[in-house]
Image: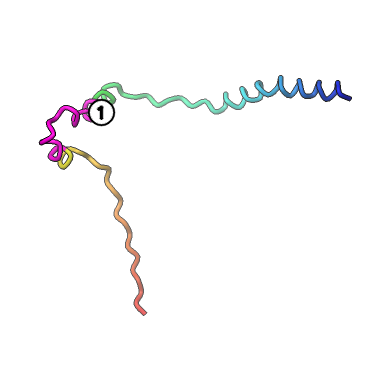
Amino acid sequence: MKKLALGILVALIAASPAAAAKKSKKAVVTPAKIDSNEASWRLVKGSLPIYIPNVLKPLYFATAHEEPAAEPKKLKKSKKR
Protein backbone atom coordinates (compact mmCIF):
# COMPACT_ATOMS: atom_id res chain seq x y z
CA MET A 1 0.00 0.00 0.00
CA LYS A 2 2.87 2.36 0.82
CA LYS A 3 4.54 1.56 -2.49
CA LEU A 4 1.33 2.39 -4.37
CA ALA A 5 0.96 5.73 -2.58
CA LEU A 6 4.62 6.55 -3.18
CA GLY A 7 4.25 5.66 -6.88
CA ILE A 8 1.21 7.91 -7.26
CA LEU A 9 3.03 10.76 -5.48
CA VAL A 10 6.05 10.42 -7.78
CA ALA A 11 3.77 10.33 -10.84
CA LEU A 12 1.97 13.51 -9.73
CA ILE A 13 5.24 15.33 -9.11
CA ALA A 14 6.59 14.24 -12.49
CA ALA A 15 3.39 15.30 -14.30
CA SER A 16 3.04 18.74 -12.67
CA PRO A 17 5.74 20.53 -14.77
CA ALA A 18 4.25 19.10 -17.95
CA ALA A 19 0.79 20.33 -17.00
CA ALA A 20 2.17 23.77 -16.16
CA ALA A 21 4.00 23.93 -19.49
CA LYS A 22 0.82 23.13 -21.40
CA LYS A 23 -1.06 25.92 -19.63
CA SER A 24 1.68 28.49 -20.23
CA LYS A 25 1.82 27.76 -23.97
CA LYS A 26 -1.79 28.82 -24.35
CA ALA A 27 -1.23 32.11 -22.53
CA VAL A 28 1.64 33.38 -24.68
CA VAL A 29 1.02 37.02 -25.61
CA THR A 30 3.04 38.76 -28.27
CA PRO A 31 4.31 42.19 -27.18
CA ALA A 32 3.09 45.25 -29.04
CA LYS A 33 5.51 46.77 -31.50
CA ILE A 34 6.96 50.02 -30.19
CA ASP A 35 8.00 52.81 -32.50
CA SER A 36 11.56 53.64 -31.45
CA ASN A 37 11.27 57.25 -32.64
CA GLU A 38 8.21 57.87 -30.51
CA ALA A 39 9.82 56.20 -27.50
CA SER A 40 12.89 58.42 -27.88
CA TRP A 41 10.74 61.52 -28.18
CA ARG A 42 8.81 60.63 -25.03
CA LEU A 43 12.13 60.17 -23.20
CA VAL A 44 13.43 63.56 -24.31
CA LYS A 45 10.12 65.30 -23.57
CA GLY A 46 9.88 63.69 -20.14
CA SER A 47 13.42 64.66 -19.17
CA LEU A 48 13.10 68.27 -20.28
CA PRO A 49 12.17 69.60 -16.79
CA ILE A 50 15.52 68.33 -15.52
CA TYR A 51 17.44 70.65 -17.83
CA ILE A 52 15.38 73.84 -17.76
CA PRO A 53 16.15 76.43 -15.05
CA ASN A 54 14.05 76.47 -11.88
CA VAL A 55 12.64 79.86 -12.75
CA LEU A 56 11.06 78.51 -15.94
CA LYS A 57 9.65 75.26 -14.52
CA PRO A 58 6.28 76.74 -13.44
CA LEU A 59 5.87 78.22 -16.91
CA TYR A 60 6.74 74.89 -18.55
CA PHE A 61 4.28 72.93 -16.43
CA ALA A 62 1.55 75.50 -16.97
CA THR A 63 1.81 75.47 -20.76
CA ALA A 64 3.59 72.40 -22.13
CA HIS A 65 2.39 69.76 -19.71
CA GLU A 66 -0.40 67.87 -21.45
CA GLU A 67 -3.01 66.11 -19.37
CA PRO A 68 -5.45 63.57 -20.74
CA ALA A 69 -8.88 65.00 -21.40
CA ALA A 70 -11.16 64.25 -18.50
CA GLU A 71 -14.69 63.18 -19.22
CA PRO A 72 -17.30 65.62 -17.96
CA LYS A 73 -19.07 64.48 -14.83
CA LYS A 74 -22.79 63.97 -15.07
CA LEU A 75 -24.59 65.85 -12.37
CA LYS A 76 -27.64 64.26 -10.87
CA LYS A 77 -30.54 66.60 -10.47
CA SER A 78 -31.99 66.46 -7.03
CA LYS A 79 -35.71 66.64 -6.66
CA LYS A 80 -37.00 69.16 -4.18
CA ARG A 81 -39.75 67.94 -1.93
The stretch drawn in magenta includes residue 78: no
Question: Where is 55 relative to 80, above or below?
Answer: above
Query: Where residue 37 sits: x, y (%)?
Result: 26, 22
Image quarter hosting the C terminus = bottom left
Region of the chain picked out in magenta, as a range: 42-60
- Farthest residue to the right: give it: 1
User: Residue tagged by mark 1?
Assistant: 42
- Farthest residue to the left: give it: 55
User: How many numbered marks does the figure carry?
Assistant: 1
**Residue at point 27%, 43% (across, down):** 68
**Residue at point 61%, 22% (across, down):** 21
Dominant secondary structure of the magenta stretch? helix
**Residue at point 22%, 40% (across, down):** 66
Residue 31 picture quarter: top left
At label 1, which amino acid type do we have? Arg
Q: Is residue 59 left or right of residue 9?
A: left
Residue 10 picture quarter: top right
Query: Where residue 53 sits: x, y (%)?
Result: 12, 31
Front residue (pair 66, 25): 66
Image quarter hosting the N terminus = top right
Question: Where is 78 relative to 16, above or below?
Answer: below
Query: Where residue 14 sits: x, y (%)?
Result: 71, 19
Which element type, helix, strand or loop, lies under badge 1? helix
